Amino acid sequence: MEYRFLGRSGLKVSALSFGSWVTFGEQVDTDLAYNQMKTAYDAGVNFFDNAEGYENGTSELIMGKVIQKAGWKRSDLVLSTKIFWGGDGPNDKGLSFKHIKEGTEASLKRMQTGYVDLLFCHRPDIYTPIEETVWAMDQMIREGKALYWGTSEWSAEQIRKAYDFARQEHLRPPLMEQPQYNMFHRHRVEKEYNMLYKDIGLGTTIWSPLASGLLTGKYNDGIPEGSRLGLEKYGWLKEILLDTEEGRSKIEKVKMLVPIANDLGITMPQMALAWCLKNKNVSTVITGASNVKQVEQNMSAMDVVEKLDDKVMEKIEEILDNKPGEEQDWRN
Ligand SMILES: NC(=O)c1ccc[n+]([C@@H]2O[C@H](COP(=O)([O-])OP(=O)(O)OC[C@H]3O[C@@H](n4cnc5c(N)ncnc54)[C@H](OP(=O)(O)O)[C@@H]3O)[C@@H](O)[C@H]2O)c1
């Protein structure tokens, strides 16, 4: 396993990490979660991602139980949770000081840990002033409930505003962002955040590297039984990813990518994950899995990164045909 610095911090995260969205509490019970996390841990994963909103807290409960059962040293782990969707009450959602404090404390209890290493604002909250959120996140760090804080799916402008306010007030600034990043979803990570990597040392913990499974090729001939896009509860995801013109065109592109993976003697999941790992602004690729075999396959992506040389990357680029445009050079 490779360990990368999380942005401009002294914290090292495994380049491949493991998260529990959709799976823990829905497809995966505590025993299976134990086997999955142990497989990931044995492959060198130190970062495990979670959120208060995943299965209404059940995902955090399961992860907490697994960590207790495994008996891992807390200092060997980088644990996260994300605050935003904590329940149905008027103060159970969003990024007010009240919800950040109460949500974080409830998450820590469920995860059976005194602190999370990474605390994320799961989305921007258009109703709460960014200043209040920065102050609350700083307070969580001062209280020892989190070591670093960051954002998820915030625009570059929102992150910059939070950072500048924190600097001005001598509060802890955000360190990392958790954006979606995969072959089909590139703009923010490859373009919008560019200045932030340089200026504020932003780290990224990227999600859905396989586009919820699309990039494994498993949906090329329909929906296999038991797979994510066949789950009744996640019909909305299927509607977005498969039932649109865009979705159908993505499947066509995956079909064209398969021969490249075959020629390299690797699988589509390996190629799609390795493609994310090639991006040096990606601190860690958060993988997800519904069984142990997938975890094993996904961890093996680490071994094939070198196979994606410039020529292969060019071939992939031709098929994807979605590279975000370069900055205009008006001098030439
Ligand atoms: N911050 C956010 O807003 C946000 C949003 C989403 C996710 N996340 C985080 O990012 C993590 C990863 O996201 P994700 O689960 O969407 O990642 P993903 O890699 O795009 O999708 C994972 C799913 O693809 C299928 N899969 C994975 N490996 C496979 C393989 N080798 N062969 C065949 N199928 C495979 C599995 O689903 P099936 O077997 O069911 O088909 C698995 O659950 C989450 O667990 C969560 O921690 C964060």
Image (cartoon, helix red, strand yellow):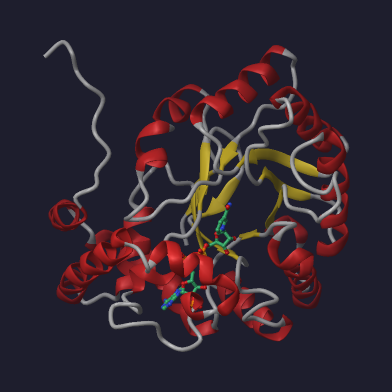
Residue at image location 61% in from the left, 65% down from the top: 21
3 lies left or right of 172:
left
Residue at image location 37% in from the left, 68% down from the top: 243
Q: Position of residue 249 (x, y in %)?
A: 24, 63
Q: Is residue 288 visible?
A: no
150 lies left or right of 288:
right
User: Which of the pair 100/243 is nearer the observer?
Assistant: 243
- Above or below residue 25? Residue 257 is above
- Above or below residue 200? Residue 262 is below
Q: In the picture, residue 154 is in which quadrant? A: top right
182 lies left or right of 8:
left
- Above or below residue 211? Residue 146 is above
User: Which of the pair 236/122 is nearer the observer?
Assistant: 236
User: Which of the pair 92/100 is nearer the observer?
Assistant: 92
- Above or below residue 90? Residue 269 is below
Q: Position of residue 103 (x, y in %)?
A: 83, 49
**Residue furthest bottom as drawn:** 225
Quadrant of the rendering where the C terminus is positioned? top left
Residue at image location 24% in from the left, 34% down from the top: 325
> Exactly how many numbered labels are in the figure?
0
Q: Position of residue 176 (x, y in %)?
A: 58, 39
Q: In the picture, residue 120 is in which quadrant? A: top right
Q: Position of residue 245 (x, y in %)?
A: 29, 61
Q: In the picture, residue 268 is in which quadrant? A: bottom left
User: Which of the pair 206/325 is nearer the observer?
Assistant: 325
Q: Is residue 62 visible?
A: yes
